[in-house]
Amino acid sequence: MLHRQGTLDWPPLFNKDRKMRGIHCAGAERYTVREPLTEVVVAHRIIEVDIHRRGWRRKMARLDPHSYTDSSHPLAKHVALTLYFDFAANTIHGSALLTLPSAHTGHLLLDTRSLLVHSVIDPVSGAPIPFSFPSSDDPVFGRPLSLSLSAQSAALIVFCTSPSSSALQWLSPAQTASKAYPFVYTQCQSIHARSIFPCQDTPAARLTFSARLNLPSPLTAVMAAARAADTRDPIAGEAGPACSDALWCSPGRAVEEFVMDRPIPTYLFAFAAGCIASRDVGPRTRVHAEGGLVLLDAAAREFAGAEDMIRAGEALFGPYEWGRFDLLVLPPSFPYGGMENPMMVFLTPTVIKGDASGAQVVAHELAHSWTGNLITNKTNEHFWLNEGFTTYAERRIVEVVQGEERAVLNTGIGWKGLNEEMERFADNMEFTKLKPNLEGIDPDEVYSQVPYEKGFQFLWRIERQIGRLAFDVFVKKYIATFKFQSIDTETFLEFLKVNVPGIENQIDLKLWVEGTGIPPDAMEPVSTIYSKIVSLANEFKQGKIPKEEEVADWSGQEWELYIENLPKSVEASQVASLDARYQLAESRDYEVKVAFLQLAVSSGCKEYHGEVESTLKQVGRMKYLRPLYTALVHGTGDEEKMLARRIFAEARDSYHPIAQGVVQSILAKHS
């Protein structure tokens, strides 16, 4: 009999023969078993079962602190998806045919969140496969779906998404540029693919996929994958159990098919569907946009240099392995600047600035084609392997295409951002480590510039130690060795020490990876233009505003660096004078605009509250939402806090679910 000190009701501890079954649980709970077991310890990652009478111990370890995937279970190699889009209900009826590398007997755990699973079927025999869920959901990680396989190498899962899926944003026609057609798009990083289809939602698992999408005409779809066939009419029977033929073949529906034949982690699964226009801007690059021809024209001009960037990346890091490098400009609600989905990068329209400087975001997402997509962090605790490497690679590409000064400015802005993150995490310095402990932590909650900028600084430190030529040789070998693999920090460090003998005696690798804060051998960039901008920012403290001739050739990046280096709180009159001369609050460059508005709110300039409200209702990029909402809740009085809550209440539905959660967290901490 089980003496219960916690809750363990899934799957059953014993089978009908009173023999112990596999135990799977996400919580950290202890159970005492009178007979025949002595003790069962259920931990977040490892479950140890001691059977003293048999002298047998079994450990079942989770592969990833953010996934229910069990390290003893096989990882799926392919998923074939059939998806029927119901825009009226904001749901997708679907099936996922998961293929394993070999036949498996026993439990197979999959991640799900806000999914309704109708059935699981053996695709060979058509027989049902037993499955079960725990009784409740974890609000962050969802709930594991347990399949009971019997010498089976595939399982067909029939499911339906929820309107509350955290990976999907459904936009009504009124929320789109067309004003006539709905739109839907995905954002699966970090752990949101599980809200689209059941999967092993960990970057440690890589798989290929095919997808068949059924949409209402005249909507079209794009995917981070290759188009497998022209748009066609639905065929009776092809949906299988995903939905009835009456739905699948109803009038006005069309089918589009895609395939990704290179293994990717699930967070890179991506699609969008709506009224989408397209234009070629290079031999390997096409720009897509939901916002109509005006936005498409602007995007084509902004990203005209994409092919030059691809060639620069290939020269630095080796062959581009993904075939195409297309770009999709999404509605303003997209929560990130860009998402590196392979073959189809997703972008916010705020990167289109009219001066080609938005191409730096493109350079970052392109760099992910080698560092992140090709080599992937094994779990989010090793996120710096993706973002630190990519930030380094981005700046090398920018240096080649746009010049060294532009790359230095980029580095300077990043340096300032890294120092600000130290202040943000002053009460929990764990999150200033390159390899933090994220046990039980929502990765979206602690998303920051630390893995980007501290990771960049670490690699830059190695480059300075061994020289650029030697470091370039190392990076190319690193990419060639681990491509299409997911690795951890320890694997990188071992590779570094083998290929750069003695590096551990020249750089304190443990301090860089496991230490908190910024290591003493990190470095602020040095250049003439950078030093001039920082000097002018320091003079502002004495009341001096830059002269027009001093800023005549500044672009948005120079202004951003200048504002970032101003004191966070100055006299309101100084802020107003600066804006009166240079109209920063009205800048088309949101990096400049938001940096200035954050300064204005922190300085108590209430006359800018209207512009802050307008900005928060126009864009959903978290890079802008987080500082503006934070500035408001830290304001000088209750007026700013009340304003923040009112704006969020009115703008909430226009934000992506991920952004909604981030803003809710900011407001909750200051309620």
Image (spheres, rainbow, N blue to C red):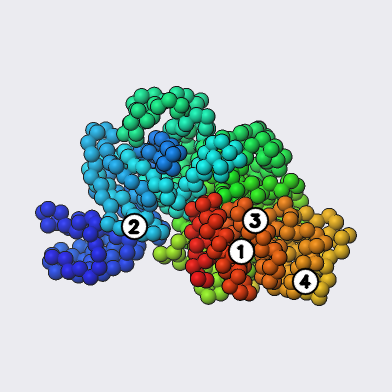
Residue 614 badge: 3
Q: Nearer the viewer, residue 245 or 440?
A: 245
Mark 4 or mark 3: which comes first in sequence?
A: 4
Mark 1 or mark 3: which comes first in sequence?
A: 3
Q: Name the residue under label 4.
A: 573
Q: Residue at x 34, y 28 (%)?
A: 245
Q: Nearer the viewer, residue 302 or 576?
A: 576
Residue 286 in the image: x percent, y percent? 63, 35
Q: Nearer the viewer, mark 1 or mark 3?
A: 3
Measure how far apart labels 1 and 3 are at the Cα level.
15 Å
Q: Nearer the viewer, mark 2 or mark 3?
A: 3
Q: Mark 1 points at which residue?
A: 627
Mark 1 or mark 2: which comes first in sequence?
A: 2
Measure how far apart labels 2 and 4 are at the Cα level.
51 Å
Mark 1 or mark 4: which comes first in sequence?
A: 4
Q: What residue type is labelled 1?
A: Pro
Residue 74 in the image: x percent, y percent? 33, 47
Q: Where is the N terminus found, in terms of image quarters?
A: bottom left
Q: Nearer the viewer, residue 645 or 190?
A: 645
